[in-house]
């Protein structure tokens, strides 16, 4: 079985309010890429993935005036992929949803959020109180994009849990001036870490119950990703993974990044940095598929579909160009036998 996570940059711009595909020459949400170019690139990528389930991060907007589920199923039908059934959880406060495309012949999936008003670990559409700035007063943290909690069963009867994540970006958007940028970046990192602490507590509930668990998505964070990490001791990704004293999750790319802070690193996203001139591409590791110990024992295989780092992707020019055109992130897959 193949499970994937793929952040598709501004996928919502490729559909109208009814979920119909807009494969025309108008601009997409990607810089200098038309909607037709992005749609065609995504068809190539999703077809090559041939996944049983794809967590789509930045999925089409879904609310009472826009049908994000219809949009994803329309795309799946047009592309002719097996993962043709879509499911969303709590609607986000943004135009970027977290959704699952899956093959209904292989998997049975339902949205199954945990926690209630009396739970020590609140439901992800609620609020989490934690002291972020060490002033002995609790701060109220919410998710702008609540994680997608899923109960999954294979056609063969194996059951496991999945949690799809799009954690808060630490980028100081809108800040002007060095001091304001620093304040905003630190505040964003505090909130991002709080979200990861909240998520880790939910992870611990599942592990304590003996459930197989996969946590996947875009964490906007990772070991050694910025200088502010030194202020807080560890990254959000490390918090969610846990340590050996607790029940840890496992992702080999995260483990590589934690063990090796210099030299070549795995990367799942590529962003253009115009300054300092003449500009350059920045490659970062943001997307992960973390598994519980029992699933790791099944000897699964991870793969980052990077157009330059993965030989299989690089050797197929059509796929290589589609990965570059389709999004600023690249898919990550997990192949596992249940």
Image: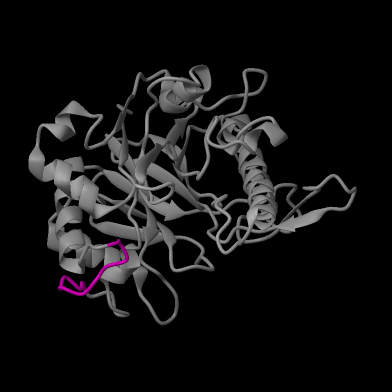
8 or 64: nearer the viewer = 8
Residue 336 coordinates in the image, percent (x, y): 31, 28
In this rendering, would 232 be left or right of 19? Answer: right
Q: Main secondary structure of the magenta part?
A: loop
Residue 278 coordinates in the image, percent (x, y): 34, 47
Residue located 12% across and 56% down the image: 80
* Location of residue 285 (image quadrant): top left
How is the rendered protein coloured? one colour
Does the image show residue 50? no
Residue 152 coordinates in the image, percent (x, y): 40, 44
* Location of residue 39 (image quadrant): bottom left
**In magenta segment, residue 221:** no
Q: Which residues are magenta?
A: 21-31
Residue 128 coordinates in the image, percent (x, y): 72, 54
In this rendering, would 312 be left or right of 281? Answer: left
Residue located 40% across and 69% down the image: 61
Quarter of the N terminus within the rendering: top left
Which residue lies most toward the right here?
A: 136
Quarter of the C terminus within the rendering: top left
277 or 85: nearer the viewer = 277
Does the image show residue 40? yes
146 or 218: nearer the viewer = 218
Which residue lies most toward the bottom here?
A: 65
* Location of residue 33 (image quadrant): bottom left
Residue located 64% across and 46% down the image: 189
């Amino acid at each position: 079985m193949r499970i994937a996570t793929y952040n598709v940059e501004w996928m919502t711009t490729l559909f109208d309010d009814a979920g119909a595909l807009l494969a025309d020459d108008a601009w997409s949400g990607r810089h200098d890429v038309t909607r037709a170019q992005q749609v065609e690139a995504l068809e190539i990528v999703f077809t090559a993935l041939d996944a049983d389930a794809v967590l789509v991060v930045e999925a089409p907007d879904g609310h009472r005036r826009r049908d994000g589920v219809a949009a994803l199923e329309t795309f799946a039908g047009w592309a002719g992929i097996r993962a043709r059934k879509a499911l969303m959880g709590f609607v986000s406060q943004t135009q970027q949803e977290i959704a699952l495309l899956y093959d209904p012949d292989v998997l049975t999936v339902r949205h199954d959020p945990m926690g209630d008003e009396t739970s020590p670990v609140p439901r992800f559409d609620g609020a989490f109180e934690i002291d972020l700035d060490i002033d002995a007063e609790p701060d109220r943290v919410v998710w702008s994009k609540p994680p997608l909690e899923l109960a999954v069963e294979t056609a063969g009867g194996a059951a496991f849990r999945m949690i799809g994540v799009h954690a808060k970006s630490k980028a100081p958007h809108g800040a002007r001036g060095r001091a304001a940028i620093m304040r905003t970046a630190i505040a964003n990192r505090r909130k991002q870490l709080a979200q990861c602490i909240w998520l880790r507590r939910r992870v611990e509930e599942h592990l304590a119950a003996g459930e197989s668990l996969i946590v996947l998505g875009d964490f906007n964070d990772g070991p050694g990703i910025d200088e502010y990490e030194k202020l807080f001791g560890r990254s959000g990704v490390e918090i969610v993974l846990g340590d050996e004293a607790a029940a840890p999750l496992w992702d080999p790319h995260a483990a590589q990044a934690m063990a090796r802070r210099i030299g070549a690193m795995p990367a799942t996203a590529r962003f253009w940095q115009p300054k300092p001139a003449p500009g350059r591409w920045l490659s970062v590791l943001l997307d992960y598929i973390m598994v519980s110990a029992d699933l790791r024992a099944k000897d699964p295989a991870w793969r980052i579909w990077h157009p330059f780092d993965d030989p299989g992707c690089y050797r197929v020019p059509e796929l290589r160009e589609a990965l570059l055109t389709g999004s600023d992130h690249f898919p990550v897959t997990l192949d596992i036998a249940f």
